[in-house]
Amino acid sequence: MYVYNTASRQNLAMASDININDIYASHSLVSTYIVVLPDDLVYERVSEQLLAEYPADWLARFLPVVQTADGSEIPIDALRGMVSLGAVNNTEVLKISATTQNPELSARICMIISE
């Protein structure tokens, strides 16, 4: 995923208007996202979204799904262990990877995190 600051986004159509400060700001945002995205709230949202989109019994084939008094949930630490984040070649490109035994599910986890 390409990360850009607000100024870069406004100027994206006119690439000649992007300056070095925009690139530095975007690069800094990638570093910030790598620190912020593994937060419990992000993974709670991933768990909630997956359980809203897929049946719990189907998810249980690929992820640990536990039953609670409030319903089903996917443990945050389990999700966190499946996901990796990193800057690609020290650029403003953020790579989000999720590893499960189902490629569709892995892709969906990455999409939820990117949203």
Image: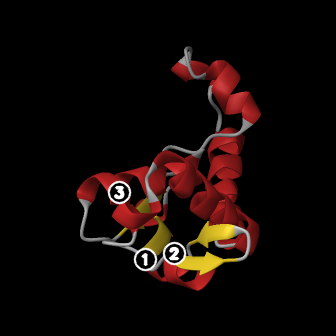
Q: Earlier in the sequence, mark 3 or mark 1?
A: 1
Confirm or deny contact between disc 1 and disc 2 (CB under 8 A): yes
Confirm or deny contact between disc 2 and disc 3 (CB under 8 A): no
Indicate the secondary structure of the residue bearing disc 1: helix
Q: Would residue 51 be found to the left or right of residue 40 on screen?
A: left
Q: Earlier in the sequence, mark 2 or mark 3?
A: 2
Q: Nearer the viewer, residue 48 or 90?
A: 48
What amino acid is at disc 2? Leu
Q: Would residue 102 be found to the left or right of residue 54 on screen?
A: left
User: Which label sits in the foreground, 3 or 1?
Assistant: 3
State the residue position of label 3. 105
What amino acid is at disc 3? Leu
Q: Nearer the viewer, residue 94 or 75?
A: 75
Q: Nearer the viewer, residue 63 or 15?
A: 63
Indicate the secondary structure of the residue bearing disc 2: helix
The image quadrant of residue 95 is bottom left
Above or below: residue 16 compared with residue 70: above
User: What is the x, y in percent for residue 56?
Assistant: 46, 63
State the residue position of label 1. 82
Count of numbered circles in the view: 3
User: What is the x, y in percent for residue 27?
Assistant: 62, 55
Indicate the secondary structure of the residue bearing disc 3: helix
State the residue position of label 2. 79
- Visible in this render: residue 37? no
Above or below: residue 97 compared with residue 77: above
Q: What separation in Å lies between label 3 and label 1 (alpha carbons)?
A: 11 Å
What amino acid is at disc 1? Met
Placement of the C terminus among the 4 image quadrants: top right
Above or below: residue 38 compared with residue 47: below
Q: Residue at x 49, y 68 (%)?
A: 86
Q: What separation in Å lies between label 2 and label 3 (alpha carbons)?
A: 12 Å
Q: Residue at x 54, y 57 (%)?
A: 51
